[in-house]
Structure formats: structure tokens, C-alpha cells
Amino acid sequence: MTEDKLLIAQGLSKSFGGIKAVDNATINVHRGSITGLIGPNGAGKTTLFNLLSNFINPDRGKVIFDNQKIDHLSSHQIAQRGVIRTFQVARVLSRLSVLENMLLAAPKQTGENFFKVWLQQPKLRQEDRLNREKAMTILDSVGLAAKAYDYAGALSGGQRKLLEMARTLMVDPKLILLDEPAAGVNPTLIQQICQHINTWNQQGISFLIIEHNMDVIMSLCDRVWVLAEGTNLAEGTPTEIQNNQEVLQAYLGD
Ligand SMILES: Nc1ncnc2c1ncn2[C@@H]1O[C@H](COP(=O)(O)OP(=O)(O)OP(=O)(O)O)[C@@H](O)[C@H]1O
């Protein structure tokens, strides 16, 4: 693993009324790594994801991605730079097909401007064909090609998570933020999801993963960051974290 830092978040804070959800938190993700983010319920992990992807604005702190400051950018602009996230409860559009869900994420879509569309029909058809090919290749790689024309709402919870992950690949991400990829997923599918994450990682995509399933964290991650009550508690290899008494105490409570 290279020591090159792909993501650096420093001193991030966010309060909701009197609740300090994230309090001066710092996290780094090395390029090429699979980094874990763990902590007890309510530790601020999802809020930290929201801050990194600017789904909510931080009160304080800075985020640098690929050597450039991104904390002033919109979540859409951050996604364009290559940081894509998933959600704890997969956000797929149930009334659209699996393939349509994939195509919605495609980056190259010649605007909605009527005249532009009218003038550029051949280009548009070519764009559409390439996006469909790409979507089908990705669906095939995760075993969802046979369901491409089914409603996404007909998928199991685990398959929806897989679809949400597969969809991130439509934009050629550099860093994927996964919010609890194993939650509510059956053990067989968890294994498959882990294999896909490893494959995508070998293809050059870095990951930051929130997960309560410690087997997943232990088997996937190079490094693990621990949050408790919104702030940094520990950072180390999975084995170091597993043997850290402070971490154990934070999970068990005093
Ligand atoms: N929009 C919000 N408004 C008010 N409080 C919030 C909001 N979002 C999060 N919180 C609070 O901030 C704290 C951190 O929540 P967050 O969801 O980030 O924790 P978490 O570590 O992701 O928890 P879990 O593991 O249970 O998903 C909690 O006390 C939560 O209730």
C-alpha cells in the first residue's frame, strides 16, 4: 500500500442544535487502500460521510481530495471529482428497472436542452449505447445482469445494496464511501460483496467503509479509524484496533 494520501479530512465538526455529532474529527484514506470507519451507534460516522461528500456543510474543518480542497464544492461537484457514496439504506429507485437505475448514474448525458438533443441525435444514440454496454458489463460482473429489466423494487435488500454499489462504477470513481454495505445482507451475499470490493480495489478504486460487522472490517481493511462521541478514538491496523482496550470500552460502555 502506498503512503500517498488520497483523502485528508482535518478538524471536521458539525453540531445539530446542542448535539456535537462530529467534533474536531480527522481521517485519512491512503490511495489504493480499503479503510474502515467504525464506532458505536451514534458515534458520528454517517455524519462524517455527509460532511466528506458535502451532503451537509461542516461547521468547521477542511477536506482535501487528490491534493485539492473540496469542502467548498457541492456534493455533485465532489462526485464529479471521483468521490461517490452509498447510503445505509440503499437509495435505488424501486419503480425503475435495474438497468435504468444504472443509466441514471451515467455521467455523459448530453443535456436536456431540446435543440441540443435534436441537433445531436446520432451522438446521443452512441452515448446511450455506450452507457448501456457499460451498465450491462458492470451488472454482469456482480451477477445482476439477469435482473437488468426487473424493477429494482423487486430485488432483495442485499441485491439493492449491490446495485447501489454497482451504480457507483458508472462514473469511474476514485474513492467510494460505503455506508454499512453488510447491514441487513445475508452471509452469502456479504461474502460476494466483499469479493467485489476487493476486485474493484485491485482495479485501483480506494474505499472508506463504515461497518458494524467486524469480520468484514477485519477481512477487508488495511487501516481502521475509530470514532466515539463524534471524535477520534483510535487509528491502526485491524488487529491493533481489535486489541485496543479503549475501543473495546467504547463499544461495551463504561
Ligand atoms: N440531522 C440530524 N439532526 C439532529 N441530530 C442528528 C442528525 N444527524 C445525526 N444526528 C445525531 O448525531 C449523532 C451522530 O449520528 P450519526 O448518524 O452520524 O452516527 P453513526 O455513528 O453513523 O451511528 P450508527 O452507527 O447508529 O448509524 C447522533 O446523536 C444522532 O442522533
Image (cartoon, helix red, strand yellow):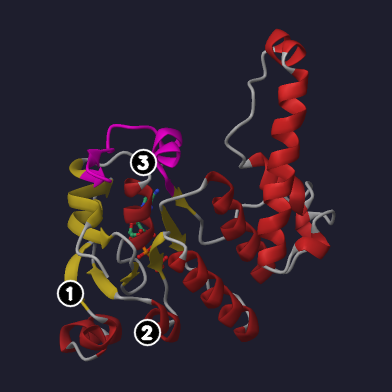
- Distance from disc 3 to disc 1, alpha carbons, whole Å, reads 24 Å
Tell me the residue at 66%/65% (across/down): 141
* Residue 92 pos. (x, y %): 66, 52
User: Which numbered mark, 2 or 1, is in the foreground of this view?
Assistant: 2
Q: Callout 2: helix, strand or loop? A: helix
First-in-chain label (2 vs 1): 2
User: Is residue 108 depicted above or below 236 in this figure?
Assistant: above
Mark 2 C-beta closer than 8 Å to ligand 1: no
Tell me the residue at 17%/89% (across/down): 245
Q: Is residue 62 left or right of residue 215?
A: left
The residue labelled by disc 1 is 234
Q: In the picture, which quadrant includes the N terminus? A: bottom left
> What range of the chain is rendered magenta?
63-83
Tell me the residue at 64%/84% (across/down): 188
- Distance from disc 2 to disc 1, alpha carbons, whole Å, reads 15 Å
Q: Amino acid at mark 1?
A: Ala
First-in-chain label (2 vs 3): 3
User: Is residue 244 depicted above or below 138 in this figure?
Assistant: below
Taking the magenta stretch, the answer to whether it contains residue 252 is no
User: Is residue 93 depicted above or below 46 in this figure?
Assistant: above
Q: Which label belongs to residue 54?
A: 3
First-in-chain label (3 vs 1): 3
Q: Amino acid at mark 3?
A: Asn
Alpha-carbon neighbours of circle 1 within 10 Å: few (<14), some, or many (≥20)?
Answer: some
The residue labelled by disc 2 is 218
User: Is residue 222 depicted above or below 81 in this figure?
Assistant: below
Q: Nearer the viewer, residue 245 or 164?
A: 164
* Residue 62 pos. (x, y %): 19, 43
Q: Amino acid at mark 2?
A: Met
Can residue 148 be seen at all in this image of the molecule?
yes
Residue 210, quarter of the rendered image: bottom left
Taking the magenta stretch, the answer to whether it contains residue 81 is yes
